[in-house]
Amino acid sequence: MNKKLLMNLKNSQQITICMALTFIIAIVIWNSDQNEVVLSGHRPIENIDTKIPFGHTIEPITISNKASVDALVGDFAVVNLYQTFTNKKTKLVLQRIKLVRSPKDRRYFGALMTMSEAEIFSQYPGPFKVSLQNPNKPNKIITKKVKKQKRQIIVEDEK
């Protein structure tokens, strides 16, 4: 049947059909290269420096509770950063910082922050403990307890 159909077509029509099929196959192959579909499930590596908003920076950070954060976090998360000490105390360094996973090596993280936050961040050595926050809710304001000073009474003698 296909031979009869091809025989009934003129030579110019056969050439047009072959060109159209070749064109369609070329587009399909070109699109599959553009999408970089990889069967192993790897995504194409992106340069993260092109995605930093104006007035912000990404600081690489060392996370002390990395194993649990790694299990909970995808590519991004909103976190509070705490400085950890050897006596197991922590100190709040920055609130509501965006944690960004490295696209080239998924074991590493960076913190997206403003330049003023980066100045504060650079004053604290790592490693940092990370506390995940809800990105849609504002944070509670954390206030430090202030120790009340004892009043001193000074008595002056008039002579």
Image: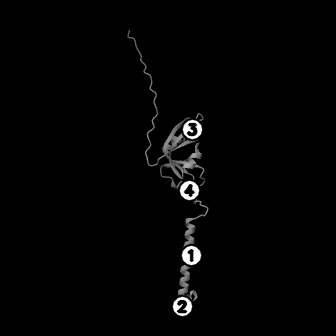
From the viewer's perspective, is the residue at label 1 or at label 2 nearer?
2
Dot 3 alpha-carbon crowd within 10 angstroms: few under 14, some 14 to 19, many 20 or more: many
Q: Name the residue under label 2.
A: 8
Dot 1 alpha-carbon crowd within 10 angstroms: few under 14, some 14 to 19, many 20 or more: few
**1 or 2: tag closer to the N-terminus:** 2
Q: CA–CA distance between discs 1 and 3?
A: 58 Å
**4 or 2: tag closer to the N-terminus:** 2
Q: Kindly tell me whether residue 8 is visible in this rendering.
A: yes
**4 or 3: tag closer to the N-terminus:** 4
Q: Mark 1 points at which residue?
A: 25
The quadrant of the rendering that contains the C terminus is: top left
Q: CA–CA distance between discs 3 and 2?
A: 83 Å
Q: Name the residue under label 4.
A: 47
Q: CA–CA distance between discs 4 and 3?
A: 30 Å
Look at the numbered disc 3 and give the secondary structure of its residue.
strand
Out of 99 and 73, give the one closest to the viewer.
73
From the viewer's perspective, is the residue at label 4 or at label 3 nearer?
3
